[in-house]
Amino acid sequence: MLTRYSPDSRGKAVRKALIYTKNEHAIRRELIDPEAVRIVSHLRNYGYEGYLVGGAVRDLLIGKTPKDFDIVTNAEPAKIKRLFRNSRIIGKRFRLVHIFFGEKIFEVSTFRSLADGTTGNSFGTMDEDVQRRDFTMNALYYDPLKEQLIDYVGGVKDIRNRILKPVIPLKIIFKDDPVRMLRAVKYSVSTGCRIPFSLRFTLNKSAPLLQPVSPSRLTEEIIKIVNSGNAHGIVENAIRYGLFMYLQPAAASMIDGSAGFSRNYASSLEQLDLMVAKGEDCRLGRKLVFLIKDLVQIIADWNGPPSEVYNKVYHECRRYIMPMNPPRIELEFAVRFCLKEGGLHVRMPKPRDKKGPEGDRNRPRGDAGPDEGREGKPAPRRRRRRKPESV
């Protein structure tokens, strides 16, 4: 095992991190997207640092194939964009770069400093950037060229011991960004890591901090839960820690008030997870069915005029899933699907003008959250697809 040293304020070399070599970390190179390696290599060719970071490294360590590969570098966004013509800068406050290879999008961020706390946007060094990461399992940096894993915070040991530990102090981690509470539950369930008592206590105590979080960020998190294949376990734990009432207040109220509804809702989430586990490529609306179908069974007048029933059920479901704000067309699909399953066929509505009244046609946008990676990042704007240029 190697050691990474960095100079302190007096210029003295201080041990900062452990470096795991190929035989020690056992990450399989074939699980890494070749385009991600190309991006890192291109950054290095121009004198910049470049590493895989976050969830991709975590998944590689536990033997899973990552869905996304996020990259971190000391190059600033404008310089990254100049190096990659098939890229664009996103975000206003928290600027990132998206690099396109066909349908694939790679997110490249710049090392952040602690000058403005754990949510600031000033650029820094890797030594500072690691202290901005939420949990130790997400604070690992992987060099795909040297096949070395850099660990500042004991993340490798924590993953192997199946324990979720925060990097940021407990007294500020959720105050700085309440959405980290949802991620803590999600990471615990998806990796099988236990949450230690101190973190559980802080989760319970901090749950009300979720109340003022914007609907766009909550929508992003709910969609990730729906797509995770672990929705049942995540929701079960979110209820346990008092988080679900801020994520889906209407559903939480009905779960709390009716044991029968609670069982049905849990069963629906299990069915959702089974569908996701099969790897079926289905639209968001098909997955939303599992969030609303138990409500539709209760409120639908199955003998009423189809168009009137549809209108009533749609508006009830819209209120029911708030503050989640999915694209209108996806919720419409889910409502029609549920009604059809109950024997009530509703004609497809005529296409709406893009300037619809509810303003929820597209996926919600917003600035990326303070944690790096794909957690809480804004949805890309629609743009004319051009043939990607090589790096």
Image (spheres, rainbow, N blue to C red):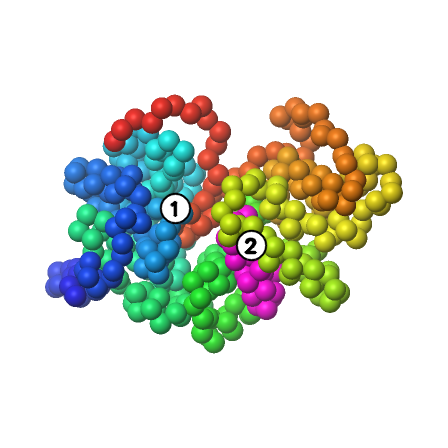
Residue at horizontal 44 percent and vertical 50 percent from the top: 375
Tell me if mark 1 has few (under 14), some (14-19) or many (20+) residues whose alpha carbon lies within 10 angstroms of its own: some
In terms of sequence position, does the residue under pointer 2 or pointer 1 come before the other?
1
Residue at horizontal 52 percent and vertical 44 percent from the top: 280
Distance, label 2 to label 1, CA atoms, is: 22 Å
Q: Secondary structure at mark 1?
A: loop
The residue at which mark 1 appears reads as 68
Q: Is residue 186 visible?
A: yes
Q: Nearer the viewer, residue 28 or 389?
A: 28
Q: Nearer the viewer, residue 313 or 218?
A: 313
Q: Is 242 in the magenta?
A: yes
The residue at which mark 2 appears reads as 274
Residue 195 is labelled as none
Q: Nearer the viewer, residue 318 or 169?
A: 318
Q: Secondary structure at mark 2?
A: helix
Q: Quadrant of the C terminus?
A: top left
Q: Nearer the viewer, mark 2 or mark 1?
A: 2
Residue 389, quarter of the rendered image: top left
Residue 242 rendering spot, x and y as whole percentages: 60, 66
Q: Is 2 in the magenta?
A: no
**Amino acid under label 1?**
Asp
Over which residues does the magenta segment extend? 223-244
Q: In the image, 345: left or right of 185?
A: right
Residue at horizontal 47 percent and vertical 76 percent from the top: 197
Residue 235, quarter of the rendered image: bottom right
Q: Quadrant of the N terminus?
A: bottom left
Q: In the image, 48: left or right of 253?
A: left
Residue 2 rendering spot, x and y as whole percentages: 15, 63
Q: Residue furthest bottom?
A: 197
Residue 221 rendering spot, x and y as whole percentages: 53, 51
